[in-house]
Image (cartoon, grey):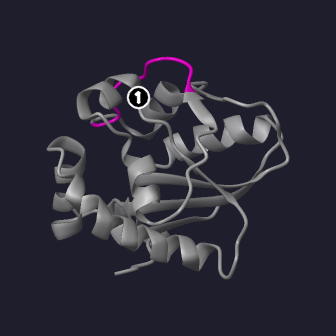
Amino acid sequence: MPVVAALTYEGVPARCIRRLKEEGETLLARPLGAALRVAIDEFLPGTGRARLVPVPTSRAAFRRRGYRVPDLLIRRAGLSVSRLLAPTRTTADQRGLDIAERRRNVAQSMRVRHARGGRDILLVDDVITTGATLDEAARALTAAGNRMLGAVTLAATPRHREFTSNAS
């Protein structure tokens, strides 16, 4: 699945994303959303008619923050959110897990809310590390009969620079 990231998750972008996610600095969502918008527009040139589906936020993270980061970024990019995915179970925090552990951790952890398929989908997430979460989201959406065009993330960790298209 093709993946495009607006920024590299290091330096200032990483600090801004952490402040948005961990410190509630939602004013940062506007410039970060603008960077995401550039990457989405590059992925879907012209009037690309795909549904922008955010990777679901865990219930615990939503309770802690009061908002869903991918959804907020999409809205601050001036676009509509299609919340087609829902978590099916609680997963462990991905930080500190290796690639195989991340895949096992998220396996079968998402479902499609509305079973109607046949949609063109562009997944959206905040940060890609190994791609395990995006793979699980794509699995759930594809199993429901949707067409995966790819994924766009706000940032990619440095070891995944090949996903990065600097939109700033």
The picture quadrant where one finds residue 36 is bottom left
Asked if residue 30 is among those painted magenta in the image, a careful observer would answer no
Q: Residue at x 56, y 56 (%)?
A: 80
Q: Is residue 19 above or below residue 32?
A: above
Quick one: quadrant of the N terminus?
bottom right
Residue 129 in sight: no
Residue 161 in sight: yes
Task: From the viewer's side, name the closer residue of 146 and 161.
Answer: 146
Residue position for label 1: 58
The picture quadrant where one finds residue 112 is top right
Q: Is residue 113 above or below residue 9?
A: above
Task: From the viewer's side, name the closer residue of 60 and 91.
Answer: 60
**x then y, percent, for residue 4:** 52, 68
Question: Farthest residue in the top direction?
Answer: 89
Q: Residue at x 38, y 61 (%)?
A: 156
**x then y, percent, for residue 35:** 38, 73
Q: Residues within 10 Å of mark 1 (few under 14, many from 20)?
A: some
Q: Which residues are magenta?
A: 87-95
Asked if residue 93 is among those painted magenta in the image, a careful observer would answer yes
Judge from the rendering whether residue 104 lies leftward or rightward of residue 108; answer left or right: left
